[in-house]
Amino acid sequence: MDLESIPGVGEKTARALAELDDPERALRTGDVAAIADAPGISQGRAARIARGAIRREHDDPGGFLATDRAREVYRELLGLLTERTVTEYAAQRLETIYPSRRRSRIEEVREFARGALEREPEPDVLAALEDVEPLERPNDVRVRERCLATTDAERYSAAREAIPELSVEVVEDAQGLAELARGYSTVVALDESFAGVTVEGDVRVRPDALENPAEIVPERPLSFFARNRTRIAAAIEVHRAAELEVGGDCDLDALEDALTRLEDDGTVAGDAELDRLAAAADDLDAAVGTAESVANDHLREAIREEDVTIEGSDLLSLVERGAGVDSLLSRELSDEYAAAVDAAREHLIDALDLESGEAEIARRIFGDEPTFPVERDENALGRLREELTAARERRAGRLKRDLAEELAGQRGPVRRLVRAALELDVELAISRFAADFDCAMPAFVPDDTDGDDSGDESGIETGFAIEAGRSPLLDEPLEAIDPVDYEVSGVTLLSGVNSGGKTSTLDLVASVVVLAHMGLPVPADRVRLHRFDALHYHAKTQGTLDAGAFESTVREFAALAERGAGSLVLVDELESITEPGASAKIIAGILEALSENGATAVFVSHLAEEIRQMADYDVTVDGIEAVGLVDGELEVNRSPVKDHLARSTPELIVEKLATDAVAANGGEVPGESAPQFYDRLLEKFE
């Protein structure tokens, strides 16, 4: 795939995308998380790039949403979907689902949506999703206690590139290697010529090190898992709660166990021996200080109680002033000094929980030569510190290598594990939307041949048929919305009383068409529709347009009349753009042109009768009929009646006044009465 051919992807972005493990898969499937893993690409930008890649994949020129109001409807519907997501990823992923004119793209999403409708948004699954996030790249790892060594300049450059986590040093011979070993806990020699060379310290000859970097730097794979430990654990919980299928290469129990042995900083947890060594190394100075106090306290007590030529208290005073302490201790208190030193040694060994070899070194910290206060041997202390530190590093290194080897093969499965959990959130958002708005999958005609949807049972050629539709854009509970049935083929005028639901009917049609062309379920019991090339939805204009705006509007409809054969056109009260008489003529001309080019259109208008008289063909007029007035409120049949010009609100009010007036006169109509006046007005509506 030529990455730069994707809309919005330049040379720099293409280089960043090329660093992904499988950029083509990520772009083809709209994997926002994987795309955002590329350097310098945010999730929002990743969604836009994915959208461009999908359009390129399906040869989709875009532009389905042809007007501002059409785009507003899409954004409102998208908002309703994203409100039902848990993760930020799912919200961004939904941005890649857009209304398209391409059948291949629509069918691709429809297949995904069908699977989504089978998902149950259980509370424990939604709760587990709260901690799932896309995997992150770990920060740069630097390991300072290890280094690589080589005698070759070319190998030096290759080593720096292959294993940037370690320092790389150039040495000339074994002596140089020995010097490095004194400064590093571990030295990895890359040259086979060093095989068999004996050097003090932890020196390993690994000519294959650059081919197996994870063995030399286990921190590399461990840092990935440490950085994403919470995310991976949450994804495991989602898979268990939702009973998602797990690939055979991923054992959730084993993965979870491995994660429990990994600290956030990439170190290994849960190993008693490593904990012992770490505690001993960290507590060494404090333990030695306490051991000194134990020995000195023991000696003070012994000196205070000793019965020699001088009183014990005087002897103590002399000793503390340093007067002949060595000879006094050697001559008079040798046994007590030995006991004090033994107590100090045992305390140190017990406090640090030292093993036999370590204990032997620890005993040398307090010598047999009598002194007071008891003095530590700094050389022996340094030796013990080095021994404990080296043992800790060796143990930690081995544990890291073992755990890294255990996890090394899990990076791919873990990516799939987290991706599946995130994609589940997308599916559940669609499922929740469908449940909240009582949705069903629509059927496209005449080219939809899936099962019972084959053929064109409704007689629609270029339009739509909606059964029991409820507009999701209404700010009302679903149960409070009257279901609407509406079918249109060709060009139609929609008439009706004020506040009767004409605009909400257009919103319903627009919502159904947008969602259907996104490949998603629609808010209706059943929908059949044509696959349109574009949606032109013109909202009601606020006030009469000036000359320039009026000219622009007419130009727009001229272009639509010329090239809008496969479009759906929804227009709300276009007559408000100019004077009523002129607008009836203009609308009639627009309807004629749209009818001739085979477009599907619904024009809401209060001038339906005038437009029908102006048109040179038999314009279909549907009506949202008011049943009457109940307590001053309109009672309306929200489903448009086919081929019916709806009565206006004023006509209904006058009719009510006439009925009330007759009732008030007891059925009598004497002379030129109010009922006769109302009857005269009603005749004007006939």
Image (cartoon, grey):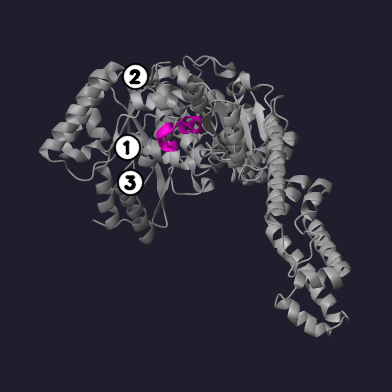
Name the main secondary structure of what is drawn in magenta. helix
Label of residue 498 in the image: 3
663 shown above or below 234? below
Q: Is residue 62 magenta?
A: no
Q: Residue at x 32, y 47 (%)?
A: 649
Give residue 114's position: percent from left, percent from top: 58, 27
Q: Which residue is mark 2?
A: 566
Toward the left, the furthest residue is 547
C-alpha gap between disc 2 and disc 1: 19 Å
Task: Identify the secondary structure beneath mark 2.
Answer: loop
Quadrant, the C terminus: top left
> Where residue 544 sits: x, y (%)?
17, 43
Q: Which residue is mark 1?
A: 69
Q: Quadrant of residue 239?
A: top right
Image quarter where the N terminus lies is top left
**Disc on res. 150:** none
- Say which of marks 1 and 3 sits in front: 1
Look at label 2 and name its amino acid. Gly
Q: Which residues are magenta?
A: 32-47
Q: Is residue 458 at all visible to an observer of this figure?
A: no
Viewer-closest of 384 and 258: 384
Q: Amino acid at mark 1?
A: Arg
Q: Earlier in the sequence, mark 1 or mark 3?
A: 1
Question: Is residue 36 located in the magenta-colored stretch of the structure?
Answer: yes
Q: Amino acid at mark 3?
A: Asn
- SS at mark 3 in the image: loop
Residue in the picture at 36% in, 40% down: 502
